[in-house]
Structure formats: C-alpha cells, structure tokens
Amino acid sequence: MTACARSISAPPALTPVYPGQRGSSPIVFCDFDGTITQADTLQAVCERFAPAATRDVLAAIATGACSLRAGVPRLIGSLRTEDAADIRRFVCRLPLRAGFGSFLLRMRERKVPVVVLSSGMDFCVAARLAPWQALIQSIHALPVAFGDPYLRACPSLADPAEALPKTAFMQRYPGHPKILIGDSFSDQRAALQADCVFARGRLLHYLRRRRVSAVPYRNFHDILRRFPVPPGGGAGKGSRRRKPPAPR
C-alpha cells in the first residue's frame, strides 16, 4: 500500500528580487480547483466516476453541513483505484482559466514565486500542471494512496477543519508578503492570513460579508492587470516574445 505519510520539505530560502527593494519578495499562493481550473475538478471527477455515492456528500459540503476535513476523504474514498488512470486523463482534459500560462510567465519575469495549494488529489493536480511545472515554485496537494480497492485520501492530522492545511504551508514562508488567489471554502482561512487577496465565487462572497478587502477577478488576465507592482518592478525584457506552454 502506498503510504499516506509523505514528508514535506522546507521551502528554499528566497531573497529580495526587486531593484531597490528592502525586505522580502512577495509570494503568490494559488488554489487549483475552480481557480486555476475553470471548474472544481474533484466535484467533476465525483460526478463522472461515482455520482450516486458522492451526491449527498457534495451537497453537504456546499451547504457547510460537512467540513472539508470530513467530506473530501469521503469523496475520494468513493472512487475506485482501478479508475485512477482514467481519472487522471479526465482531469488533464479539463480547461484551465484563461491567462494562467501568461500569468506564470509574468511572475517568473518579476521573480515572484508561485506556490499551488490544493485540497484536490495530488496525482491529478500534478498531472494537470505538468506543462507548467518549471514555472511553479512548488505544488502541495492532498496525498492519495492506491493500495486498496478504493482510493484513500491522507488528510492532515494537524488540522481538524481542512483536508490540506493551507495556512500551515503559508507559514512555511515567513517574512514574505503573501498574495492569495482563490475561489471557495478551502481558501477562506488562508485569505484571512494573506496581505492581498484575489477572490471570486464563494470566497469573494465570504470576504465581503466579513468586510475583508479582496480584488475580484474572472481570469488571470484580470489578476495581472491588478497585480501589485513592487518598487522598481515591471515586466522583464523580451516578455512580448515569450508564450506560455500549449495546453495538453
């Protein structure tokens, strides 16, 4: 059986990158499901591969009657291990939000690290982002074990509310301004710890109810237009000639 316990290495040290800037460079923490992808991929997978077994759990999560920490493992545990390869191929065909590749290139030019935080299945998230791996600082997603007839999620034991403790990963980068991009329940606690938030969907409504400042967006082009420009920052030379990797 594939072990659930997977070591999480400390992030590499990051140094100030902007001319004349004192202090540390910002870091972008970006959600995957419904943020990088146009739709919630875990929900789409459940509706495609185990609709009857997951319908009630999905509804309970949507209403808040079931926490992500309790609900996500139940969803993943309804998926057959023998379908894992088909699930991976299904996720790799799901469309991404417009401008994602261009956004990663611009962040690379500005030397702003992008960290992906996802409560989705790690093997699906890694496969869908493979074409852009070189432009992403790190990817943290929910580990999944394959040794049983059904997939088995391995949520964090340290957080009673979240399947993946996004705030804990953010704290692994101390001293850096934190920019969060998200869309739903799993991003709420992380948004409250961020210095700047780009939000849509349920996350935007949640922050507005709490009167927390957030920048709305529809796609990554919107985020680029409103992205904070540091002192001396700006696009690097040759940015007009570079194109993002073609989707696979």
Image: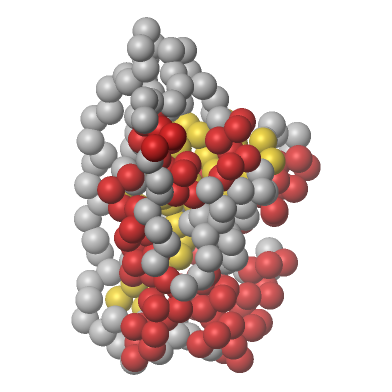
**Where in the figure is residue 139, as x and y percent of width and height?**
34, 52
- Which residue is rendered at x = 44% and y = 85% of the image? 79
- Which residue is rendered at x = 37% and y = 54% of the image? 245
- Identify which residue, 96 or 5, lies in the foreground: 96
Query: Which corner quadrant holds the C terminus?
Result: bottom left
Please identify the quarter of the rendering in which residue 28 is found. Answer: top left
Please identify the quarter of the rendering in which residue 150 is found. Answer: bottom left
- Which residue is rendered at x = 47% and y = 32% of the image? 178
215 relative position to 70: left or right: right
**Where in the figure is residue 196, as x and y percent of width and height?**
57, 31
- Identify which residue, 132 or 72, lies in the foreground: 132
21 relative position to 11: left or right: right
**Where in the figure is residue 2, as x and y percent of width and height?**
22, 76
46 relative position to 237: left or right: right
Q: Is residue 112 visible?
A: no
In the displayed structure, 227 sits above or below 87; it is: above
| Total marks in image | 0
Q: Is residue 28 visible?
A: yes
The colour scheme is secondary structure
In the displayed structure, 118 sits above or below 175; it is: below
- Which residue is rendered at x = 56% and y = 45% of the image? 220
In the displayed structure, 136 sits above or below 66; it is: above
- Identify which residue, 196 or 74, lies in the foreground: 196
In the displayed structure, 229 sits above or below 11; it is: above
Residue farthest toward the front in the current orientation of the protein: 241
Query: Which corner quadrant holds the N terminus?
Result: bottom left
Residue farthest toward the top in the current orientation of the protein: 20
Please identify the quarter of the rendering in which residue 5 is found. Answer: bottom left
**Where in the figure is residue 174, as x and y percent of width and height?**
36, 29
